Image (cartoon, grey):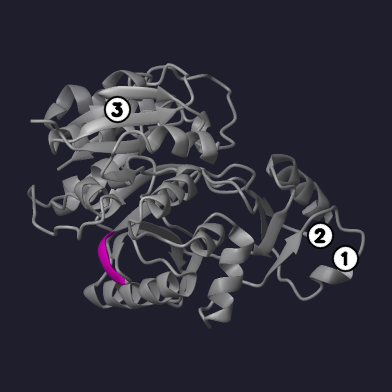
Amino acid sequence: MNRKRIVILGTNEYQNPLILRAKELGYETHVFGWKTGNIGEKTADFYHNVNILDYDALWENVSKLGAVGVVSIASEVAMPAVHYLLRKMNIPCNSKETDDIATNKYLMRCALRDAGIPGPKFMLIENILTDYSLVKDFKFPLIAKPIDLSSSRGVVKIDNLDELNQGIEYALNWSEEKKVILEEYIGGQEYSGESIAYNGKYKLLTITEKTTTGAPHFVETGHRQPANLSEEMFKKVEERLYSAFKAMGIKYGAVHPEFKITEDGEIMFMEIGARMGGDCIGSDLVPLSTGYDYMGMVISIGCGKAPSFELIGTPGTSEIKYIINEQDLEEFEYIKNNSPEKIYRYSEDIHELKKNSEILKSADRPGYYIMKY
């Protein structure tokens, strides 16, 4: 019997768990992406060397397969392409307008503001400022970040007026569109809420507690589930998240909101991705901590079917830690030698620590390990 074919966009190590899960569920996997030697080129049943941003070429190839669905995880770049293909295949998915909002930090801020959802003061910047009166109502510190990038690329904290243009220039140099959002800095502990949407209905699966390198670039160094929050706060977060998703028009698929809870208990969004969280959050941490088949849910929705909330594992605590320095590497070796049962898996490049290398973005982190306990 021929297996049902499914299209997966992306080939890197963060996409690979999705490829493997689709195969476990009985699908014939057709994986598309640039040929770079990534692991997905090898683990796929069929690999297609196609630029996923060339929508015409992508559809020309996909339309010949008779596939039942299209999926991708943890990729801001891939999701608009996924939805383009799903619309071609008449499978319910997010709209083009929602794709635009979810991949443009300025449009996202505008959508949340217009829905009355609290957030920081912000503005769009396209050039170095010559008129400082434009920010006279802003309270320092500020954050500058490209409107069109993720994974902490181009993010910088600006502490005072003297640093303003230097920070704007830094963010502008990263942006492909040469546009930056400038906003007031939000204090408080950082979290993300791993969620699923189907037909405009939402389910918050768990909340992730984050650690970062801190100022000036805030690159994420670890994630832990579930977050140490009261049931009352969980419900408050849940309500705020669902309002934000609705404001952005998100109706289908994984949703990854990143937010902070301030000292006075206010929930303030940093950004919201209409995708599964990267850094192995959705692919590994959610199933380990909740028992939910998060990737299976995404696969079902990408095939036009409702997600199942049946547990496939035992809930617990899960955590991913990134190797930033020698101390992190020593901690990993200690756990591996003394509590090996806690180690779920770790990256092949975990020992490739580059001394004195500055961590400016997520891709600069040498390696990681995942734990369950």
Q: Which residue is mark 3?
A: 332
The answer to whether the residues at label 3 and label 1 have Cβ atoms under 8 Å apart is: no
Find numbered disc 3 in the image and state the secondary structure of the residue it sits on. Answer: helix
Is there any visible trace of residue 117 in the rendered image? yes
Displayed quadrant of residue 256: bottom left
Q: N-terminal of the two: label 3 or label 2?
A: 2
Q: Nearer the viewer, mark 1 or mark 2?
A: 1
Report x, y in % for residue 34: 49, 25
Find numbered disc 1 in the image and state the secondary structure of the residue it sits on. Answer: helix
What residue type is disc 2 on?
Leu
Left or right, 162 with respect to 124, comes to right
Quick one: label 1, few (<14), some, or many (20+) residues within 10 Å? few
Q: N-terminal of the two: label 1 or label 2?
A: 1
Along the line of sight, the residue nearer the viewer: 273 or 31: 31
Residue stretch rendered in magenta on the structure: 201-206
Left or right, 330 with respect to 190, comes to left
Is 324 above or below relative to 222?
above
Quick one: label 2, few (<14), some, or many (20+) residues within 10 Å? some
Residue 141's tag is: none
Displayed quadrant of residue 334: top left
Report x, y in % for residue 197: 30, 64
Q: Nearer the viewer, mark 3 or mark 1?
A: 1
Q: Which residue is mark 1?
A: 132
Q: Residue most toward the right?
A: 130
Query: On the rendered image, what quadrant is the C terminus found in?
Result: top left
Is residue 138 inside the magenta stretch?
A: no
Report x, y in % for residue 168: 76, 51
Along the line of sight, the residue nearer the viewer: 221 or 39: 39
Residue 161's tag is: 2
Identified at 27% across, 61% down, the residue is 228
Along the line of sight, the residue nearer the viewer: 163 or 327: 163
